[in-house]
Amino acid sequence: MDVDFLLHFANFSTFIVCAVLKMPQMLMLVRAKATTGLSLHSLLLELTGFIVFVSYQMYYNYPPPTYLEYPILITQDVILLLLILHYNGKMKQSIIYAAVFVGGWKLLTVEKWVLDMAMSVCTLISAGSKLLQLQCLWRSKDSAQVSTLTWALAAYTCMARIFTTMVTTGDTQVLIRFIAMTVLNVWVTATVIYYKPSAKKRD
């Protein structure tokens, strides 16, 4: 099969999937009005990783189709964060988080070395996000409010990005990141399925 066709398909399908990636999780939260099994710290680390990654891609003028989904993912993470804070009764903290993230984003682009250093630990940040979510699931042993579909789709997008990175930029840092994220997303997906209440497998 033509490589260009596969590349376009991978880019397009990743964008479409990411456009609705967090929707199942948001709907589950709104319906349940509870955040059991969801890690706030995991979400904060994921958001940090997304901001660093898209800043790096934009700074080095990488092809937009290889990172176009990240602004959408960041927006969805912000909405998800607000929902979690709302249902935990901690909406006042949203102002603090907003100030930290906006300030951090500005800091990344002050000097090239700052962005390069941030990108060098971006994989660890993103991996830490998945591990915190796993830890939260292991502790609660309840994934009733965690969307299986969201995590499965996240695993697919990372697998697609392994292919697009190899074909386009070949950036080793980016490639290692997506391989690690694929493994961890599959692990979280399996854990979510394992802890789903047997009588409520409805995701």
Image (spheres, helix red, strand yellow):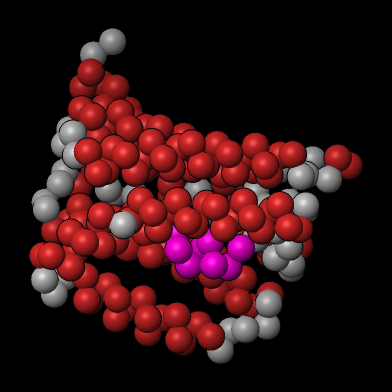
Instruction: Name the residue: 16% across, 43% down.
Output: 63
> Residue 105: within the magenta?
no
Q: Position of residue 69 (x, y in %)?
A: 34, 49
Is 119 in front, or is 28? 119
Q: Position of residue 201 (x, y in %)?
A: 79, 40
State which quadrant residue 59 falls in: bottom left
Count of marks overlaid on the render:
0
Instruction: Name the residue: 76% across, 58% down.
Output: 140
Q: Quadrant of the C terminus?
A: top right
Residue 74 visible within the image: no
Instruction: Name the residue: 25% across, 55% down.
Output: 120
Residue 131 visible within the image: yes
Image-based side of 128 in relation to 107, left or right: right
Magenta-tinted stretch: 39-46
Indicate whether 148 appears above or below 42. Answer: above
Image-based side of 85 in relation to 87, left or right: left
Q: Quadrant of the N terminus?
A: top left
Indicate whether 48 appears above or below 158. Answer: below
- Magenta highlight: main SS: helix
Instruction: Name the residue: 58% across, 39% down.
Output: 187
State which quadrant residue 26 falls in: bottom right
Q: Position of residue 166 (x, y in %)?
A: 23, 29
> Residue 41: within the magenta?
yes
Q: Position of residue 46 (x, y in %)?
A: 45, 59
List the single residue furthest toward the right: 199
List the single residue furthest toward the top: 1
Image-based side of 170 in relation to 151, left or right: left
